[in-house]
Every structure is written in structure tokens, then in C-alpha cells.
Amino acid sequence: MEETLFTLTIKDLEFYANHGLYNGEKKINQKFNINVYITYAINVTDKISIEQCIDYVEITSMIKEVMKHSEDLMETLILNIRNEIMGKYSNIQKCNISIKKYPQLNAKYEYIAIEI
């Protein structure tokens, strides 16, 4: 069997949540966009089964659950998302995630982002 690497991309998942260090951030639902890039290995035979693949519906549900729990820091939030994903699938080689947080309270920037 030949092992082949695949990359699953989930782009611009949109959430409204209360993440942030400051009181105003905790009170107002802020817009977040999340991108996920997962590289995983499959032992390729004649036919690939769904059990060998990464289920993008499950990944989006996992992220949705993590986003429900308020965090002070985006670093903690992004690590929680990655840990959930990596803990579920043993065939993941690499998991890159980016989170964009859009301004509230009349801030003058397009967005703040963090990547892992």
C-alpha cells in the first residue's frame, strides 16, 4: 500500500462569540473567521473509504463547540481548537489554523489574526 498525503481546507468559518481579555469584548458578540488546513495520510488501495478520511462536518462541529467557551486570549482559543482536532484523528500530519477577529467598539483596523 502506498501512503498518500491529502490536505483538507475549511475556509472562513464564521462565528459570533465573546472572546477577549477586556470586559467590552466579553459582553459583545464579536465576529470571528476561522481557516483550517489539515494534512493527513491515507494508505491508498483501490478504493478509499470514508473511515480513512477527515470528516469536515465533524471538524466544523468541534470548532463550533470550542467557540462556545469564552477565552481571554486568542492563543488559548486556537490551541484548544487544534488540540480537539489532533486528539480525534491519528492520521493527521499537520494542522494549521488561523483565526481572524474583527473590530468592535469603533476600532480602526480591518481585523486581528493569529495562526498556528
Image (spheres, rainbow, N blue to C red):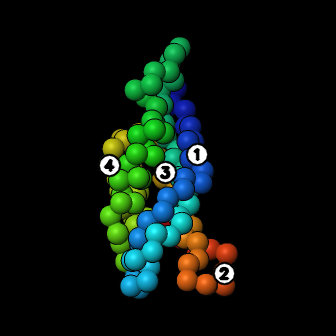
Quarter of the view holding residue 4: top right
Distance in Å between CA atoms under marks 3 and 1: 12 Å
What amino acid does circle 4 point to?
Gly
* Residue at screen point 41% across, 57% down: 82
Badge 3 marks a residue whose secondary structure is: strand
Disc 3 vs disc 1: which is toward the camera? 1
Query: Is residue 111 depicted above or below 52 in this figure?
Result: below
Quarter of the view holding residue 20: bottom left
What amino acid does circle 2 point to?
Tyr
Residue in front for this viewpoint, 69 or 95: 69
Q: Residue 81 at what x, y percent from top left? A: 40, 58
* Residue 62 in view (yes/no): yes
What amino acid does circle 1 point to?
Thr
* Residue 74 in view (yes/no): no
Check contact, mark 1 vs mark 4: CB within 8 A. Answer: no
- The residue pinned by badge 3 equals 94
- The residue pinned by badge 1 equals 9
* Residue at screen point 59% across, 54% down: 12
Q: Earlier in the sequence, mark 1 or mark 4?
A: 1
Mark 4, residues whose alpha carbon is within 10 Å: few (<14), some, or many (≥20)?
few
Q: Which mark is residue 87?
A: 4
- The residue pinned by badge 2 equals 109
Q: Residue 49 at what x, y percent from top left? A: 45, 21
Query: Is residue 15 depicted above or below 54 in this figure?
Result: below
